[in-house]
């Protein structure tokens, strides 16, 4: 009887796993077929106004890059505080808040940034978009830093202190180095996550058909443009959306795999 | 002469009513090895960790009594329990080094590991650093094995080598006292033998206190032995007296394996 239940349970889990994988495969195959059909290398050379995606891809990276410049230092510092300095209630409170922030719907973050930045400054801008993405990123970086530092053995910190180093030097010289690979991987995965976000950008940076490096006005974004293009009536626009989705997926996939590759190789 | 005098010392962990150490009085003799033995939970590690105040990494501990450390430069004894300032702590830890149970190499090169404490102490001159690192590694019997790969990561060394590296790192800053907290309990017998030889060799230059679970180890290497039980110091004497002719019944019971 127990063997029988065992077999049923095994069959059920295999079945469920297959369903999950089937949908994932389906998405990837659809993307591949539809996206590759309209894919062309000229997409990387022309801007959206000329039927290409160049400005959007560059814009998306600039937004995510700027968000990382804001989000990584804040997130890491907060993570270090929680793990190394915070004791008792405050650290626990920040940790909880960060966890809640991590599960905040991205559209809510977009709306929040719209209210506190876009409205007062009088218009959408690349800065607003980057800030929205940074807000998405911060809790992920906090969480990674916190977790990775907690894996560093206590003795390593004590050994540093026992040599006469002060606490901040032990953290900077030893603890962070020991957790470096884990933190870097976490940051890379956080980056992969925000680069594919649409909702936080939808009414903060919007998008632009033209190449732009001016972050104080509407800024080209691949994801927002996919959203716009998919709603256009013309067939050609929707094909372009498929191609853009395909490129975005490949980019995210590469970043994700790089993150995993680093972890596996430098454990 | 005693390099450290522990006087009527009691220690209480935060959030606990009863002290973990009660009224301990014990000298650490200069250029001798003092072993602290006793069953688990007797407080020997707690006592050792008071001698460089590494306890203070976690706030809320309560110290009573005195731990006096001889300052070799001035010849005066200072009570280390009165230390409050950061720079005094740094000086204390340069005077009193510590080796842990598990090897604790830092995630950096072998050279940088040994140079770490020296750099903290403010030595920047490249050739002086090289000299001190070489001397420390030779003193820890590791030089022959690593002299051609000083720039490689210390994480690639074996457990025994890592422990000798940690000893080199502690010796490099020329401490007066070295504290060993069960330094061989994570090592194989051959590495253990090497570390024991090294500790005996080191007593020319430093005074040593060692916590060990291994009574053969205590009898092999130490000059003095303190037997502790449930936070009390039961007996302290020359090692041969403790092992051959203990005065207290509890000591004899523990030595002969009747409890513990």
Image (cartoon, rainbow, N blue to C red):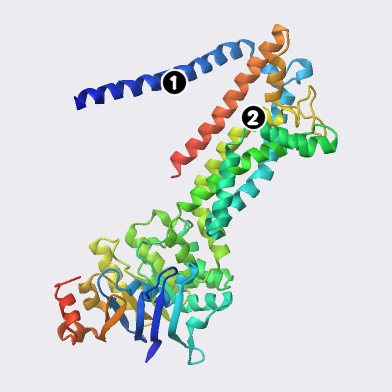
Quadrant housing residue B178 = bottom left
Q: Which residue is mark 1?
A: A21
Mark number for residue B93?
none
Circle nearer the N terminus (1, 2): 1
- Above-or-below relation of A177 to A237: below
- Disc 1 versus disc 2: distance between alpha carbons? 23 Å
Counting from the top left corner in percent of width and height, residue A75 is at: 61, 47
Quadrant for the C terminus of chain A in the image: top left
User: Camera-side residue: A158 or B103?
Assistant: A158
Counting from the top left corner in percent of width and height, residue B221 is at: 26, 77
User: Camera-side residue: A171 or B33?
Assistant: A171
Counting from the top left corner in percent of width and height, residue A216 is at: 82, 36
Quadrant for the N terminus of chain A in the image: top left
Marks counted in the figure total 2
Counting from the top left corner in percent of width and height, residue A240 is at: 68, 14
Please state if A91 lies on the left or on the right of B2 as rendered. right
Q: Is residue B225 visible?
A: no
Q: Residue at x 51, y 66 (%)?
A: B116
Q: Residue at x 43, y 71 (%)?
A: B170
Q: Residue at x 72, y 39 (%)?
A: A131
Q: Residues within 10 Å of mark 2 (few under 14, many from 20)?
A: many
- Above-or-below relation of A48 to A117: above
Q: Which residue is mark 2?
A: A197
Please state if B20 lies on the left or on the right of B228 as rendered. right
* Chain ID, mark 2: A
Please state if A179 lies on the left or on the right of A57 as rendered. left
**Are marks 1 and 2 in one subunit?**
yes
Q: Residue at x 76, y 31 (%)?
A: A205
Q: Is residue B168 visible?
A: yes
Q: Which element type, helix, strand or loop, lies under badge 1?
A: helix
């Amino acid at each position: 009887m127990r063997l029988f239940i065992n077999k049923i349970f095994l069959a059920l889990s295999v079945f469920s796993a297959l369903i999950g994988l089937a949908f994932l495969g389906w998405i990837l195959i659809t993307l591949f077929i539809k996206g590759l059909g309209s894919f062309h290398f000229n997409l990387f050379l022309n801007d959206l106004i000329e039927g290409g995606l160049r400005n959007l891809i560059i814009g998306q990276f600039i937004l995510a890059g700027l968000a990382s410049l804001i989000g990584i230092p804040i997130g890491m510092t907060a993570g270090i505080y929680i793990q190394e300095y915070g004791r008792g209630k405050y650290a626990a409170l920040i940790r909880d808040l960060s966890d809640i922030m991590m599960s905040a719907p991205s559209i809510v973050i977009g709306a929040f940034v719209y209210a506190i930045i876009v409205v007062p400054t009088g218009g959408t801008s690349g800065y607003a978009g980057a800030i929205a993405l940074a807000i998405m990123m911060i809790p992920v970086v906090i969480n990674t830093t916190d977790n990775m530092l907690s894996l560093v053995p206590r003795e390593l910190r004590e050994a540093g202190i026992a040599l006469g180093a002060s606490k901040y030097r032990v953290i900077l010289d030893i603890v962070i180095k020991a957790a470096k690979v884990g933190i870097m991987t976490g940051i890379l995965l956080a980056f992969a996550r925000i680069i594919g976000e649409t909702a936080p950008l939808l009414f903060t940076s919007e998008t632009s058909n033209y190449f732009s490096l001016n972050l104080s006005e509407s800024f080209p974004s691949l994801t927002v443009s996919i959203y716009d293009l998919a709603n256009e009536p013309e067939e050609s626009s929707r094909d372009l959306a498929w191609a853009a989705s395909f490129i975005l997926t490949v980019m995210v996939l590469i970043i994700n795999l790089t993150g995993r590759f680093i972890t596996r190789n430098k454990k | 002469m005693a390099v450290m005098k522990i006087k009527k010392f009691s220690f209480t962990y935060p959030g606990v009513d009863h002290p973990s150490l009660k009224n301990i009085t014990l000298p650490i003799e200069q250029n001798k090895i003092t072993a602290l033995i006793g069953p688990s939970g007797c407080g020997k590690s707690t006592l050792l960790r008071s001698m460089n105040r590494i306890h203070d990494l976690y706030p809320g501990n309560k110290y009573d009594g005195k731990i006096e450390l001889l300052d070799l430069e001035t010849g005066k004894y200072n009570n280390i329990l009165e230390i409050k300032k950061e720079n005094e702590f740094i000086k204390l830890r340069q005077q009193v080094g510590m080796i842990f149970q598990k090897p604790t190499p830092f995630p950096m090169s072998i050279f940088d590991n040994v140079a770490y404490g020296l750099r903290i102490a403010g030595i920047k001159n490249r050739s002086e650093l090289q000299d001190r690192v070489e001397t420390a590694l030779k003193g820890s019997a590791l030089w022959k094995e690593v002299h051609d790969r000083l720039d490689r990561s210390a994480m690639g060394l074996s457990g025994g080598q890592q422990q000798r590296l940690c000893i080199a790192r502690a010796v490099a800053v020329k401490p007066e006292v070295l504290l060993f907290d069960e330094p061989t309990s994570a090592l194989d017998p051959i590495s253990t033998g090497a570390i024991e030889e090294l500790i005996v060799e080191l007593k020319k230059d430093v005074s040593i206190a060692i916590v060990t679970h291994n009574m053969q180890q205590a009898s092999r290497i130490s000059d003095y032995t303190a037997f502790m039980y449930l936070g009390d110091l039961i007996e302290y004497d020359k090692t041969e007296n403790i092992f051959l002719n203990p005065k207290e019944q509890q000591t004899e019971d523990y030595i002969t394996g009747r409890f513990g």
